[in-house]
Image (cartoon, grey):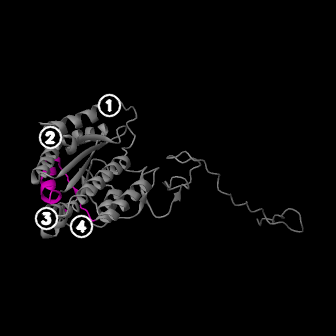
Amino acid sequence: MASVVVIIEGSVCAWGEMNEAHGDEAIPEIIRSLVAFTNAHLSMSAANGLLILGYGVDTSKQVIFDSRSSVKGNVVFDTSRAVIQGIREILEHGLNVEDSTAHSSLAPALAHGLCYLNTCTTLSEALPTNSIATTETKASKDNRVLIVSMRDEIVTEHSQLMNLFFTANKYGYCVDVVALDNPSPLLQQAADITGGLCLRVSKPDELLKALMTHILCPTSLRTSFSSPPEGTVDYRAACICHNRLVNQAWICSVCLAIMCQFMPICKVCKAVFPLPPQKPKKRPSTAAGGLAKKKPMLK
């Protein structure tokens, strides 16, 4: 049993920018590619698990589809219809957000996905010891997370996401990233820390090809196929104020937010800091305790 958690960007602004950049067919093409990929994963084995989450400005842990709840009694839900309806609901819910500059919250959705994978791993290890259970346990090592991002700005969750990336690496969960824009340096670090892939898709019609060629294959078999060229990963942190990579910065002692310049109030946790001590100004030199005498100017 191999379980995959797909985390999709649910920000209305990100989908709107994608529509403006690539035309009206961009959004339907992305949805069709995601539906085809999820159906392909479920068709590879009847024991495969799938959880699709949408992360947005106000819907941080929106469950779009869960394969464990897709079968109730003798009724089997249509995966394609459930995925399309779930994406539509999360986008409609995002229309009520007035602040269009707000950034999507990825950390809660990623934490939810890692808990789901841990549950699947625990259930597979609890099976009775036989040949089938051994196969299921080996397949559970291929549990992984796929993040589909449309923005390169993740500025307010650096410490939370780094903790989640190292947690995923500790438990052996791979984090793959498919970016429809320039990938965020933080997501590049996620793929590098957990041994996953970070792919950049320049056009929406190339999304399905990237998913089927590189992401669908289990992590234990990826060495048998040609892998995409790996670029250099920049491990510098991005500041929360200007979203630029910095070598030296101020760090909030409460939430560990990174700032490229001193701020009396943290933008993330609203903590208040005292002003740094200022150096005393140098006074002009005096002669015999009096004011300095001015030298006569030559004509």
Amino acid type of the residue that numbered disc 4 sits on in the rendered structure: Glu
* Residue that label 2 marks: 79
Name the mark on residue 95: 1
Going by the image, does 286 lie left or right of 198? right
* Residue that label 4 marks: 230
Please give the name of the residue rendered at 19% of the width and 44% of the height, measured from the top-left corner.
67
* Cα–Cα span, label 1 and label 3: 50 Å
Q: From the image, state whether disc 2 or disc 4 is nearer to you.
A: 2
Could you say where residue 248 lies in the image, as x and y percent from the top left?
Answer: 50, 63
Q: Earlier in the sequence, mark 1 or mark 4?
A: 1
Tell me the quadrant of the picture where the C terminus can be found.
Answer: bottom right
Amino acid type of the residue that numbered disc 2 sits on in the rendered structure: Thr
| 200 magenta-colored | yes
Name the element at disc 1.
loop
Which image quadrant is residue 209 in? bottom left
* Cα–Cα span, label 1 and label 4: 37 Å
* Residue that label 3 marks: 131
Mark 2 Cα-neighbour bin, 10 Å: few <14, some 14–19, many ≥20: some
Q: Earlier in the sequence, mark 4 or mark 3?
A: 3
Please give the name of the residue rendered at 35% of the width and 29% of the height, measured from the top-left corner.
96
Name the element at disc 2.
helix
Q: Is residue 273 above or below residue 229?
A: above
Q: From the image, state whether disc 2 or disc 1 is nearer to you.
A: 2
Amino acid type of the residue that numbered disc 1 sits on in the rendered structure: Leu
Q: From the image, state whether disc 4 or disc 3 is nearer to you.
A: 3
| 296 magenta-colored | no
Asked if residue 15 shows in the view, the reply is yes
Name the element at disc 3.
helix
Could you say where residue 177 lies in the image, as x and y percent from the top left?
Answer: 26, 56
Going by the image, does 181 lie left or right of 107? left
Name the element at disc 4.
loop
Going by the image, does 65 lie left or right of 240? left
